[in-house]
Image: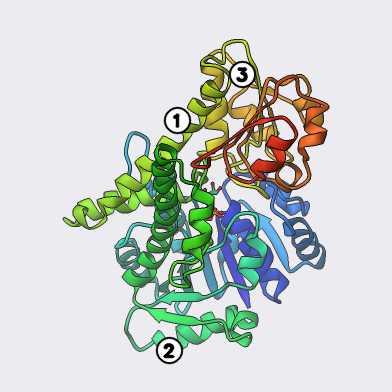
Amino acid sequence: MRLTVIGCGYLGAVHAAAMASIGHEVVGIDVDEGKVESLSRGEAPFFEPDLQELLTAGVDSGALRFTTDIAAARGARVHFIAVGTPQQQGGYAADLTYVDAAVEALLPHLAPGDIVAGKSTVPVGTAARLAELIEPTGAVLVWNPEFLREGWAVKDTVEPDRLVVGVADGPDAGTVVETMKAVYHTAVAADTPFLVTDWATAELVKVAANAFLATKISFINAMAEIAEVTGADVTQLADAIGHDARIGRRFLGAGIGFGGGCLPKDIRAFAARAEELGRGESVGFLREVDAINLRRRDRAVELVVESLGGSVYEKRVTLLGAAFKPHSDDIRDSPALDVAVRLRGLGASVTVTDPAAIDNARRLHPQLNYVEDRDEALRGADAIVLVTEWDEYRRELTPEHTATLTDGRVVVDGRNGWDAAAWRAAGFAYHGMGRR
Ligand code: UDX
């Protein structure tokens, strides 16, 4: 099938390459010339495992191409809208400028029977508004949210755990659903749950899922705050409650909390939209979820200060990690970098290392000292802080090896990823978050 993907960022580039890999003919469209040039050469403009291989294969076979020319959308059966919906400048609501611009630009190229499939995360009610613009062309709008996780984006796109398609009632609904099943034919053949809903439900599924995940993380971080004043251990607590199948252990990792391009802005946009709908109190708890999350960054800074005797001034502190999570070079709202910047603000001499995110981090925070090589970054440090749980740090770095590099014997584990006993046995003062 011929498909268009409008917006070639973390979501769209992966979606375009994944769709080409399952047999479709795909055109990716973006306004950013640099991004289009890089993608056209088969080069991923950001770090995402497996994307490079998929892009190269798609571009080489001719099934996948990229352009800045929106007219290239003409003749495709399904047009995916995959542009960003960042947090508004000076507000909490989502900025829909890119979604609106993409739809406006697409309108002249739509033909009767085309499907426009919204993938961007939007405030509930957006699909109904966009449909009024799209319907006069004879095209049909569906809402088809994406649940991919960065670092696993290719796998999540090719083998999603569920597919959700929001359609309006009408004579075309059956054909539209069949077409969307044909798009995702490999997942459908693998019996992936395929849920057909209305637009509003499809829009809400995405924000509700992210709100739930954020709440789960902040819940365990709230327990970490209680553990800190009672001498309890939040990791053992999470293990114990996680054995209850109704609760589950995943997303109960206490530490410096969540960041990235989705969870923080999505919960804020959801709260803002609920206010507009007169139901602010229904998701009022999301403000608390946000506040707990941000407090954990303060706590990590406090722990470093305390562990260095009350001041970090002129102390050498090495942060292991810059990305908001491992397997990604994304530094949007990264708790890791936030902690680094704050420590520098307190006078510490901060060194940051990361296997993938240094270039992005340097562009945003040129004032920090970046060192590519992990061991070089550790050399001479007074304290080290684990802020992104890459395997290179969490699994591969041993306390014994670290002791040969650092001057000080202080570790702050901002992701509760290390074995406290092993670090203590090697002579380090170990400080976890909500851990004894
Ligand atoms: C999220 C959703 O998981 C995904 O379904 C949606 O499509 C987009 O938003 P992503 O932003 O890639 O995906 O990251 P995710 O894996 O959810 O992690 C978000 C943040 O939470 C990271 O900063 C991570 O370090 C943190 N986190 C995660 C915790 O602090 N504790 C946990 O137990 C899990």
Q: Which residue is mark 1?
A: 298
Q: Amino acid at mark 1?
A: Asp
Q: Are marks 2 and 1 in contact (CB under 8 Å)?
A: no
Q: Amino acid at mark 2?
A: Gly
Along the horizontal axis of the image, is 137 left or right of 151? Answer: left
Eye-nearest disc, 3 or 1: 1
Q: Is residue 82 visible?
A: no
Q: Of 178 and 308, which appears nearest the observer? A: 308
Crowd tier of the residue under label 1, counting other residues whose Cα lies within 10 Å: few below 14, some 14–19, many 20 or above: some
Q: Which residue is mark 2?
A: 174
**Looking at the rendering, in which quadrant would you find the N terminus?**
bottom right
The residue at the point 72 percent across, 50 percent down is 44
Q: CA distance from mark 2 to mark 3?
A: 56 Å
Residue 294 horizontal/vertical position (percent): 42, 37
Say the numbered circle drawn on residue 38: none
Q: CA distance from mark 3 to mark 1?
A: 20 Å
Sequence-wise first label, 3 or 1:
1
* Element at label 1: helix
